[in-house]
Image (cartoon, rainbow, N blue to C red):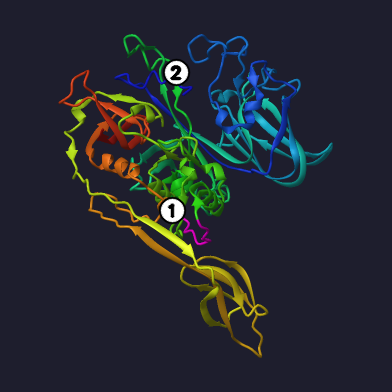
Amino acid sequence: MALEQKYLNIPIRAEGYIDIIMYAQDAKVNIANISSNSVNTYSNIETLKDIKSYTNTTIATLEENMWLLNGKFPNPTPGVRYNGYISNEVSDEQGNFTTNPKIDIELATISEIESFSLILNSAVPSGYPKQIKCTFYNGETILTDITQDLTTVDTLPNVIFDVNQENVTKVTVEFIGTRRGKRRIRLSNLMFGRVINLDQNQVISTDYTDKCSYVPDSIPSRIFSFTMNNYNQIYNIDNPENGYINLDRNTVVLIRNGYNIFGYDEENQRMDNPDKFQQIEWDDWKELRLLNITTSDDTCTFECGSVLDMMEDTYTNETFINNRSVESITDTLMQFEGLPDNTVIFSNDDDGKSYGAYTINTVLPELPVRELIQLLAFSVGATLLIQDDGTIKFANLKLNDLNSFTNHHEFNYKDFASVPAAEQLENTTNISLPKYNSTTENDVTEIVRTTVAQNQVEITYSECVPVSALPENKVVPISMFCKRANLNVSVSEAEPQIEVTIMGHKISTVETQERSVTKDTLIIDTKLMKEDPGDKIKEKYKLWYSKKFKYTMDTRGEPLVDAGDIAKIQTPFSGEDQLINGYVLQNHIAFDGSWSGDMEVVKL
């Protein structure tokens, strides 16, 4: 990781920090070039268009009170360009510029712009502009311009422009003055779409639960919720000023946690005057999706989850093909959910074969997509992990090789007073995995015959590969799948109803391996198995279930620890040099200015 994480294990903590960015990006609008008539030499203006390059920190500049050597305004390193935008011009005593700083944005193609958003740098609110003027061009022709007065608004650092303009090729952002004199303009990010940034000054509290299993006998999950004040009912759905009303489950939510490490003594592992100044060390961004918003008269709570938590739609478009690869199936499932193919990624098994190359030769059941992903991982012996970048990984983790646990990092937990003795769960060695094989008959036969009278009708039938609906001159298929067909039926007054026949190839599924399960073993009937599971998957699962000693413990709140990490735990029964290796099943964190939390860890 780029993060040093030197503050992770020290015994005391200063204040914590949190950043939350919610955005619904217009993926059809792409920036070809970005430039400015007034840009500071150490500003990397290109990072404005990358939301994950967001920064709310500052560096020392020469305007009034922006050079104090107190740790809050570090001097720039020569030759280094810093993320974000800082204008080269400084406003006068009245906060006016001789020439207003501008940012020019050239688009890759002629585009339709619905919304355009800016995030000002909240680290220097005295440098917020008095006004921002956005001008939208087609070539050199001005299509429209919009000016926002920021001297009275309370939504900063977020500035959202509702544009609704077609045929745009270029946008100019002009910053008119600063709200205080002797200041530079500072901008963290810009985006075509809607983007909202929040920090601990606006958030009352947060709650985060990250959980997984070594074998996917349960579905991994990351649920993050945060609560904000709603005294003025700004988040109510009937409030026309509600800037959140256009957010939905496609809204991406980025979260990261920070720690004040100023005064940290690495050799002695202590903090000297940690509250005096700020030097924030940030965790990596975690990418989630907005799932739900609930409001009351006093508060509003936003609930977010991983992309896997979001996949609750039941997959109904199953079309059976012999020996499909797991990767081709997940690609189809992602298309069904409107997500890119690379949402699911694959590592290799012990023999170097990609889990995505395993084949499945049976009909997928009609289940929510997240459950199908779980069953696919379970059937090929992969550990299912949620990654910080939002992807879902079929991972190959080895209980006897801790070097294979590369999801995040190892972490030492030595507060053994909060670690009770391990709970010994029931050991199970009687494990058998199911194997199913499906074939399609060569002959085309009648699948179902029914009488219909509607203009549109859904017909359901047993497993088959449909090929046609008869009579052809009366019925036009919209779509035909293994278990159902959506049809357009043409019915005349003279013939108020007609008989429809679905023709197709029948599918026969045979169980080729017996399955024996006890209450503590493989609790899922996957019905999905690769062509020859062999003994390796059995032994992997058997090893896991024979090691189920679970510790639960209170923590200080450990935001850097992911479910799936290795924890090294000191218990009342282990010495300083005899730390227990544990697999983190669940990490729960609460933050309301200070951290608290708890974990579930299985002894390896």
Q: Is residue 320 magenta?
A: yes
Query: In the shown orientation, is residue 213 left or right of residue 25?
Result: left
Which is more toward the observer, 503 or 253? 503
Q: Amino acid at mark 2?
A: Gln
Q: Secondary structure at mark 2?
A: loop
Residue at (75, 40) in percent of width and height = 109
Q: Counting other residues with Cα less than 10 Å from the Cα at mark 1, is it few (<14), some (14-19), or many (20 or more)?
A: many
- What is the magenta segment's predominant secondary structure? loop
Q: Position of residue 198 (x, y in %)?
A: 50, 35
Q: Position of 120 compared to 5: left or right?
A: right
Can you tell which of label 2 and label 1 is closer to the viewer?
1
Q: How many marks?
A: 2
Residue at the disc numbered 1: 372
Quadrant occupied by the C terminus? top left
Residue 189 spot, x, y in % from top left: 61, 31
Q: Which residue is mark 2?
A: 278
> Residue 523 lies in magenta, yes or no?
no
In the image, residue 540 sits, relative to residue 4, either above or below, namely below
